[in-house]
Amino acid sequence: MPNGSPVSIVMIEDDEGHARLIERNIRRAGVSNEVLAFQSGTTAVEYLLGPDGSGEVSANRHLLILLDLNLPDMSGVDILEKVKSNANTRRIPVIVLTTTDDEREVKRCYDLGANVYITKPVNYEGFANAIRQLGLFLSVIQVPPAD
Amino acid sequence: MPTRAPRIIRDSFILLTAGGVVLLGVVSGSIWLANGARASADRVQLSQQTRSHAYRLQGLAQDAETGQRGYLLTGRDSYLQPFLDAQRDLPGELAALDAALNAEGRDGEMDKAAALVRAKFAELDDTLELVRSGDRAAALAIVNSDRGRTLMDSVRAETDKIIDSSDRRVEAASRDLQDNARIQAVVSVAGGVVVVIFVAFAGWSALRYTRDLLRARGEIEALNRELEARVAARTTDLVRANDEIQRFAYIVSHDLRAPLVNVMGFTSELEEGLGAVRRFVTAPANERKGALKDDAEVAVEEDMPEALDFIRSSTRKMDRLINAILKISREGGRVLTPEDIDLGPLVEGQFQALGHQFEALGAVFHVDGELPTVVSDRLALEQVFGNLLDNAVKYLDPKRPGRVEVSARDLGSRVEVSVEDNGRGIAPQDFNRIFELFRRSGAQDRPGEGIGLAHVRTLVRRLGGEISVDSRLNHGATFRVVLPKTLSTFYAESPNA
């Protein structure tokens, strides 16, 4: 990535298989950044905002979030809202990656501050292709530096 | 009720006809009685005429005698005038009395009186002839013979007879008139009473009919309102069921697709690995080294086993999901059998099944007061309260002594049963999500598929009830189940039937 900054990709995806496939396809696109996989919203929120929920733990982190909306324990929209309403985490780019293409949901995510909204194609070839393009996108995206 | 409308028409016709007959009777009776009254009045008039004629005849005889006496005493012609007048009027007066008696049908009654009067007048005439001829002594001798006086007494007696008889006839006719008037009064009053009775009866049946109509209209209105309410309730149910089916279809398609994408993805990864192995195997023996050999080794040692693991776990997951969907679908199709159920022992039984879990955690179970009796499906209620108690004990907070309490509230035709715990609680934004299939809330540190509450809500709704949750995160949760006291067969019908 530009500046050579060590950006970590926070991947919030409940399905372990999906997570592995996403990581592999990102790697194939030439992205070598660290990928932190979280299988539940609870653990991801705890990582992002800290156990106290203040978000100070992320103040000096260099992150990018890949977010699935359908999680078993909490809605991805709730995570998005938490991240974007916290002063320490609101600049972190969030890429929503989900199967839903409901217009209202897309709009709502952008309203809440999502940076990119990607619909997972239903077939695997489409899925893999989208992930590879996402990988290319990740390799050029500019992540804001930590304060 | 439908027979009453023709009956009122028939009754009205009968009453009108009867009233008409009575009125006709009263009118014709009155005409007949009036005729009788007129006849009686005629009889009175005739008898009075007869009486006055008889009286006048008596008067003529007396006038004639008076004139004779005066003439005999004085010999002057002026005293003779009354006799002459009487003699002149006599034939007319006799004819008039005869006519009056004939009109009354009393023919022959005056024969004797007429003969006596004529004899009297003849006797008077004889004496007067003797005086005119100068034989005054002979005339006085006739008078002295008392023949004239006897004749006069007889005339008076005979005419008095006619007068008395007439008086009796007047009296009888007057009595007839009075009787007639009395009968007339009785007939009028009786007819009036009968008509009043008929009118009262007609009024009463019209009133009864109107009351029936009003009651029937009230019943129809009530039925209408009930029907409208039932249609509205049914529509709400259908809209809710439709929303639920759409949501269910979305969840099922998403949750089934996720492992399917994994199966396809890792199949593709398997192919990649197979390609690396094939390239290594098909390469000439002297070239089987370096990157070619490393790739093949990574494929065989790491990538391909990992892919196989994911394929296996994904197919297992699909199998579990399909089984869960089948379970809910079968539950939805089961025929409910309503019976009397005392919720106290039922909830106690579900607690007993979880007894060892409560014991292991040192948690307390308490039923607050009496639980009500409902008419519902036993198996469904066992599953509802079994699941709720299971969840309550499963998500207790280890930081404080666990406590699960069940209580009930009467809501009229429905009852509300609450299952309250002091466990970890649920975030407000998840109050709806937890009832959806495959969705769970909070930390995923307990086993579960996200099926229990979805199943409970499906069951409660089939029982005609509703379930809701209220919770404070980290303080506990209260699940409220509202059930109808009596499960209507409307809900008991199988949706597949």
Image: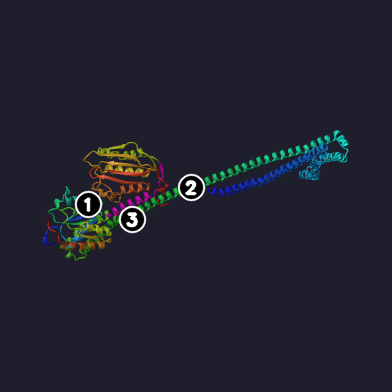
Spatial CA distance of label 3 from label 2 is 48 Å
- Position of residue B2 in the picture relative to residue B177 (left or right): left
Local secondary structure at mark 3: helix
| Prevailing secondary structure of the magenta residues | helix
Q: Is residue B334 magenta?
A: yes
For disc 2, the marked residue is B214
Answer yes or no: is residue B435 visible.
yes
The span picked out in magenta is B314-339
Q: Nearer the viewer, residue B313 or A37?
A: A37
- Label pair 2/1, CB-CB below 8 angstroms: no
For disc 1, the marked residue is A41
Q: How many marks?
A: 3
Q: Chain of mark 2?
A: B
State the mark number for residue B246. Answer: 3
Q: Which residue type does callout 2 highlight?
A: Leu
Answer yes or no: is residue A101 visible.
no
Q: Chain of mark 1?
A: A
Residue B168 drawn at (x, y percent) = 74, 37
Q: Nearer the viewer, residue B398 or B224?
A: B224
Spatial CA distance of label 3 from label 1 is 25 Å
Residue under the point 36% across and 52% down:
B241
